[in-house]
């Protein structure tokens, strides 16, 4: 049986890297007595895969891990057992059964929502002017920026990877940016790179550690090739009663 677990990663846990989170969840499965399936062979391991690795320092309430189980209790009971053994900063939010034909989360991730704030002392001097320039920025034919890769630096057009970028929080609310960007193995845009490109277009420089980034949701694209119909990964499963 295929199961998809949605979880939050907040607080000090945002500094834990992806490989350590994988090891952590393996221990959680054992401590919570999840009847998880193991691979065969000389070195059996838990059948487990994560949707989209989260960068160190980013918080989220939309992380996903897929597992296979031999048997299971209800979603409510499994969430109780898993959260009983979780460390502070990590919380299982949903536990849902997937169809047998469901593809692994990591193979279908297409986009993610983020909320981005500037740390105190790093905010643009004129927020309204900064926010007002976003519309013009997105109407450009191309949005060129330099992306660092393992092989060096290269200039890329990130406009096709920005699905939404808008300001929020005017007035009494903290100023923030809401965005939806390409995420996954086919195309992947880090939120900070989109902000960097916008600031460079205004003659500004994005300072290191200037941003507080939170991932709000991760999506699969349910539409035909060349179109978009984003669906949260959580909605592809159903609760177990």
Image (cartoon, rainbow, N blue to C red):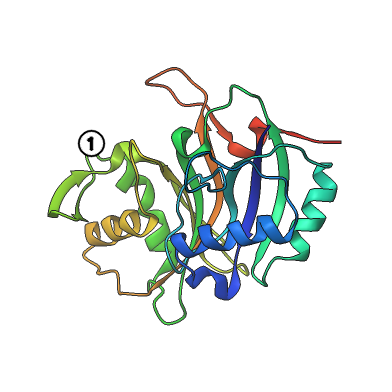
| 91 lies above or below 157 | below
Q: Furthest-front residue in view?
A: 42
Q: Which quadrant, please, contains the C terminus?
A: top right
The x, y position of residue 137, in whole percent, is: 30, 48
In this view, the residue in front, 30 or 96, is: 30
Q: Is residue 96 left or right of residue 231?
A: right
Secondary structure under the numbered disc 1 in the rendered image: loop
Q: Residue at x 66, y 60 (%)?
A: 28
| 199 lies above or below 63 | below
The x, y position of residue 80, in whole percent, is: 82, 56
In this view, the residue in front, 88 or 188, is: 88
Quarter occupied by residue 55: bottom left
The x, y position of residue 213, in whole percent, is: 48, 63
Residue highlighted by disc 1 = 141
Quarter occupied by residue 102: top right
Q: Residue at x 37, y 21 (%)?
A: 226
Q: Which quadrant, please, contains the N terminus?
A: top right
Q: Is residue 98 left or right of residue 155?
A: right
């Amino acid at each position: 049986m295929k199961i998809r677990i949605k979880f939050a990663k907040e607080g000090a846990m945002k500094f834990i890297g992806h490989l350590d989170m994988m090891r952590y969840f393996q221990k959680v499965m054992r401590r919570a007595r999840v009847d998880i399936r193991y691979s065969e062979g000389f070195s059996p391991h838990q059948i487990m895969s994560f949707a989209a690795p989260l960068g160190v320092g980013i918080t989220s309430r939309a992380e996903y891990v897929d597992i296979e189980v031999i048997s299971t209790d209800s979603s409510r009971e499994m969430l109780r057992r898993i959260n009983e053994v979780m460390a502070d900063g990590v919380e299982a939010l949903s536990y849902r059964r997937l169809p047998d034909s469901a593809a692994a989360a990591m193979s279908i991730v297409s986009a993610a929502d983020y909320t981005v704030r500037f740390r105190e002392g790093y905010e643009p001097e004129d927020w309204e002017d900064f926010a007002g320039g976003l519309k013009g920025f997105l109407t450009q034919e191309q949005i060129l920026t330099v992306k660092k890769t393992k092989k060096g630096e290269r200039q890329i057009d990130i406009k096709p990877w920005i699905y939404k970028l808008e300001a929020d929080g005017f007035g009494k609310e903290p100023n923030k940016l809401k965005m939806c960007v390409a995420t996954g193995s086919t195309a992947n845009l880090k939120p900070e790179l989109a902000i960097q490109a916008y600031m460079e277009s205004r003659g500004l420089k994005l300072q290191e550690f200037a941003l507080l980034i939170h991932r709000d949701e991760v999506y699969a694209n349910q539409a035909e090739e060349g179109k978009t119909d984003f669906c949260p990964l959580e909605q592809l499963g159903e609760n177990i009663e």
